[in-house]
Image (cartoon, helix red, strand yellow):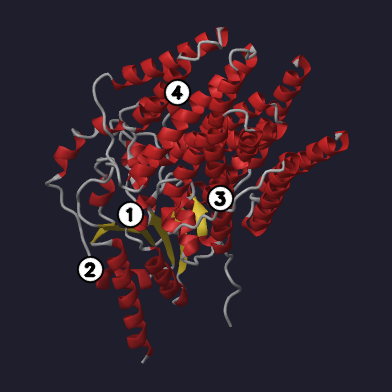
Amino acid sequence: MIASEHLIEITYLIATALFILSLKWLSSPATARRGVWAGEIGMVLAIAGTLLHHGIVDYKWLGNVAMTAVPQRTALSHAFGALCVTLVGTAEFYLRTPEVPRFTMSVLSLEVILGSLTFTGSLMAAGKLQEVLPQRPITYKGQNVVNLGMLAVAIIIAVLLVLDPGRTALYPVMIAISLAFGVMLIIPIGGADMPTVISLLNSYAGLSAAAMGFVLDSKLLIVAGALDGASGFILSVNMSKAMNRSFTNVLFGAFGQVQTTAAATQEARPVRSATAEEAAAILSAANRVVVVPGYGMAVAQAQHRVRELYDALTKRGVDVKFGIHPVAGRMPGHMNVLLAEADIPYDKLLDMDDANPDFPQTDVALVIGANDVTNPAARNDASSPIHGMPILDVDKARTVMVIKRSMSPGFAGIDNPLYYLDNTLMLFGDAKAFVGGLVRELSGASAAHGS
Amino acid sequence: MKVDLITSLYVFMLAAFIGFEVIRRVSPLLHTPLMSLTNALDAIAVVGAIIIAGERKTNMSTILGTIAIVAATSNVVGGFIITDRMLKMFKASKAPKQ
């Protein structure tokens, strides 16, 4: 008996080490897949160890999703993880009440409050990403007061439960308020803030799992939860920095309200536009092209066309790179995954810090479906709502091309002075169709020149 | 109990520090796979769910535990599969052709 207990503990220990190695190997694409294997082996060991202990059979369950749905899927998996943690916490509470030590009750409350708000919050986020729910931020007067009030009530109930875990009637109230809080928290979040919010929910899911580790006295869970919490936290900090906003500003700031005034003044200014033919001619004459993709590319599913454009230009000796803003898309690294799916080599994908010094030597910066992350107002207009946000300096390139459906302001509703610059050409149209047009022009032209 | 608690806190603190150090080095290129992988690892919470469901102390704990197992297991399997699929797509430039 004792020997088997030790065996299980050692299995958990090895699993823990494998989890850490798994994340370490994720630091480079060259070793990253090894990292997944390490994680898988660790998981198998841990689960096998548990099954060994309790002799319970597990069911196999398969999950398979399209790459474009990755943000939704990630949000859903946060929801599932949080659901698991909340249910286990709830079961523990009812099994142990009324004799729950104070510390255990405190972490248990933390576990289920974080767990339930992450559950509903992530479902809301997934709904917004899947466009089942309206993507626009919904704000109303006194929203922050209501939200903070709900959180405060949940915490007060938690304190009451810690003082007397026998008050079982209070427990469902705490859960209900936390679930409602999760919904209210995500209602005012717009699509552009999704990367930060998903990271934050990731962190909450991790912390609630770590809290569950304290409740169940499982070091393995504590470590896994701490790793996940740390990862989510780092990503949220990165995302907030990339938007020059604080956490509180993302969660409680009303990003949706500021811009309504800015949108009105944009009508009269002239823009230069170009056809696919003209744009293709400029592109083929360029030495260096930097493509700046954004959420619009994902929506239009244009990544495979972009790959064809990359091939056509590379074949002509044009140096093509991709400049990727940390908050481009709807989750951290969203653009990288889409471009990798389209078989674009990862060494061509530059992050913001690597891409920016190159723009002055770039002939053409081609913006596909990105808006706010290229807005020079963030750099030089103190009155802009996004002032101070680090951007990709596409305006420093010799020519800027922007593929855009129309002149209507982007998701956040902020006017972009980039479109009115002398070196900017607007390419109006659907991203996928327009890039397809560019590819056709380029291949047609090369055939003509070749003959 | 007291000693156990302190040990657990140490474990949490050290794991958090290791997490920060290890994850800070993950390239922004791989932030999406990072999130789905940590999600899958996090679903080790399934261990807790298996214990709760398997003990069969009360009907409620068994039912809650079972739902929890389903939720977490889908995360484990789905998380690893999708992370691996994503990473498979990341390829370096091939050496210049001919």
Residue receiving disc 3 = B79
Horizontally, residue A312 falls left or right of residue A212, namely left
On the rendered image, what quadrant is the N terminus of chain A found in? top right
Residue receiving disc 4 = A175
Q: CA distance from mark 2 to mark 1?
A: 19 Å
Q: Earlier in the sequence, mark 2 or mark 1?
A: 2
Q: CB atoms at circles 2 and 1 under 8 Å apart?
A: no
Q: Nearer the viewer, residue A181 or B86?
A: A181
For label 4, the SS is: helix
Residue receiving disc 2 = A275
- Identify which amino acid the numbered label 2 is placed on: Thr
Instruction: Identify the subunit bearing mark 2.
Output: A
x, y (%) of residue B64? 53, 34
Of badges 4 and 2, the one in the foreground is 4
- Identify which amino acid the numbered label 1 is placed on: Gly
For label 3, the SS is: helix
Residue receiving disc 1 = A296
x, y (%) of residue A32? 64, 55
